[in-house]
């Protein structure tokens, strides 16, 4: 049997986030927590527009963890709204407001209102790599084959 691990994360509600829900899993099997728009007035993104949307929260992730900000599939499908730098990374030593960089890739304007679910936040472990400079790397069958090297 596989069980999930629970992690305690401290979260601070900022003044402009009052009366908004804290991030929450919408189903028992959900990997992502929903984040909410902490805007005072509705904002409209024209096709091609991008903007930082405040969430009204900051958090203290433990060392060895990050928060990944990802698009909500429904907003992407229905409106072409996505997170521009997906996944956006919130580092464990960042204590500022969580902001979501959204872009409208759709063909129509999209208006976001206060309290609307705008993105998902997935808490994930991180690994700190140590690099060793070498003269040669081990060879593989793929080698340096990159973008599209296997065809369609």
Image (spheres, rainbow, N blue to C red):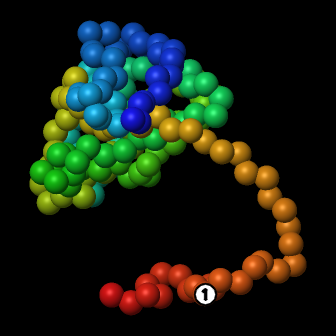
Residue at the (39%, 35%) spot, across then down: 1
Residue 113 visible here: yes
Rendering coords of residue 70 (x, y %) = 37, 44
Locate the C terminus and report the quarter of the image it occupies: bottom left
The percent position of residue 143, horizontal first and vertical second, equals 63, 85
Element under disc 1: loop
What residue is at 24 percent from the left and 58 percent from the top? Answer: 105
Q: What residue is at 26 percent from the left and 21 percent from the top?
A: 40
* Picture residue at 41% right of the left edge, 36% below the top: 2
Q: State the image coordinates of residue 82 (x, y, percent, origin top left).
A: 29, 50
Query: Label 1 crowding class (10 Å Cα cut-off): few <14, some 14-19, many 20+?
Result: few
* 1 in relation to 13, above or below: below
The reply to whether residue 99 is in sight is no
Q: Is residue 3 left or right of residue 107?
A: right
Say which quarter of the image contains residue 26. Answer: top left
- Residue 133 x %, y %: 85, 67
Farthest front residue? 1
Horizontal arrangement in the rendering, residue 144 relative to residue 6 (left or right) = right
In which quadrant of the rendered view does residue 92 lie? Answer: top right
Task: Please tell me which residue lies in front, 30 or 86.
Answer: 30
Residue closer to the observer: 3 or 65: 3
- How many marks the image carries: the answer is 1
Which residue is disc 1 drawn over?
141
Q: Where 19 sits versus 72, above or below?
A: above
């Amino acid at each position: 049997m596989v069980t999930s691990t629970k992690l305690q994360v401290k979260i601070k509600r900022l003044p402009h986030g009052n009366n908004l829900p804290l991030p929450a899993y919408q189903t028992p099997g959900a990997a992502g927590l929903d984040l909410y728009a902490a805007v005072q007035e509705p904002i409209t993104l024209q096709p091609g527009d991008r903007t930082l949307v405040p969430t009204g929260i900051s958090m203290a992730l433990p060392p060895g963890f990050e928060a990944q900000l990802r698009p909500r599939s429904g907003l992407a499908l229905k409106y072409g709204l996505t997170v521009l730098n997906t996944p956006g990374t919130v580092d464990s030593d960042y204590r500022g407001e969580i902001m979501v960089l959204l872009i409208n890739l759709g063909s129509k304007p999209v208006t976001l209102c206060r309290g609307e679910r705008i993105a998902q936040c997935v808490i994930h472990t991180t690994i700190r790599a140590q690099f060793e400079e070498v003269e040669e790397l081990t060879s593989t069958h793929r080698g340096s084959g990159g973008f599209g090297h296997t065809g369609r």
